[in-house]
């Protein structure tokens, strides 16, 4: 199972490079990281190793791929956040979120659709 990772902005951008381009070689990843993030090759390899050790990506013989899709990863992070901060209560999370931010009509419609789809088993 994936160990704890709360990516900073730079790590999240680095992860996005992998998700958007996989499979890619570690050399290609280093070049893209240099271009897009201004990182040196050693920085890319250090962050890649850290993310591989956390079980999010793998580097097999110089080919980098993900073990989780971006959607799966952020789904797991969201579940963990709600579990840790709101004792697993989604309604408590929504109440806290909406106490400071008013939902738009489109957001409310989307939430209704999600609940309807969930109830219908879609």
Image (tube, rainbow, N blue to C red):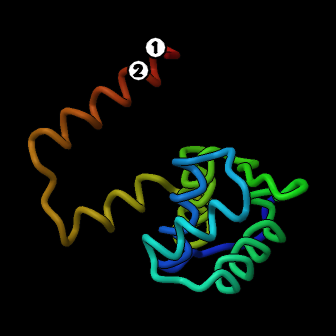
Please give the residue where the numbered disc 1 appears in the rendered image. Answer: 120
Q: Which corner quadrant of the image does residue 93 belong to?
A: bottom left
| Residue 119 picture location, percent across and down | 45, 20
At 46% from the left and 14% from the top, the residue drawn is 120
| Residue 69 picture location, percent across and down | 62, 44
At 33% from the left and 68% from the top, the residue drawn is 96
In which quadrant will I find the N terminus?
A: bottom right
Q: Which corner quadrant of the image does residue 28 belong to?
A: bottom right
Q: Is residue 122 left or right of residue 59?
A: left
Please give the residue where the numbered disc 2 appears in the rendered image. Answer: 117
Marks 2 and 1, Cα distance to the nearest angstrom? 5 Å
Looking at the rendered structure, the secondary structure element under dot 1 is loop
Query: In the image as oriented, which residue stretches furthest toward the left?
Result: 105
Q: Is residue 49 left or right of residue 33?
A: right
At 75% from the left and 57% from the top, the residue drawn is 57
Q: Is residue 22 above or below residue 47?
A: above
| Residue 13 picture location, percent across and down | 48, 68
Residue 93 numbered tag: none
Q: Are marks 2 and 1 in contact (CB under 8 Å)?
A: yes
Category of crowding for the residue at label 1, using alpha-carbon neighbours closer than 10 angstroms: few (below 14), some (14–19), many (at least 20): few
Q: Is residue 116 above or below residue 27?
A: above
Q: Nearer the viewer, residue 76 or 94?
A: 76
| Residue 105 picture location, percent across and down | 9, 41
Q: Is residue 25 left or right of residue 10?
A: right
At 19% from the left and 72% from the top, the residue drawn is 100
């Amino acid at each position: 199972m994936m160990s704890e990772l709360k990516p900073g902005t730079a790590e999240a951008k680095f992860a996005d490079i992998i998700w958007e381009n996989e499979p890619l070689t570690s050399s290609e990843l280093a070049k893209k990281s240099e271009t897009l993030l201004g990182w040196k090759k050693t920085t890319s390899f250090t962050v890649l190793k850290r993310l591989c050790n956390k079980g999010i990506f793998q580097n097999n013989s110089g080919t980098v791929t993900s073990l989780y899709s971006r959607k799966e990863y952020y789904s797991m992070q969201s579940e963990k956040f709600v579990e840790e901060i709101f004792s697993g209560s989604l309604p408590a999370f929504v109440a806290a979120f909406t106490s400071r931010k008013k939902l738009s009509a489109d957001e409310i419609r989307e939430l209704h659709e999600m609940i309807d789809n969930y109830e219908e088993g879609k």
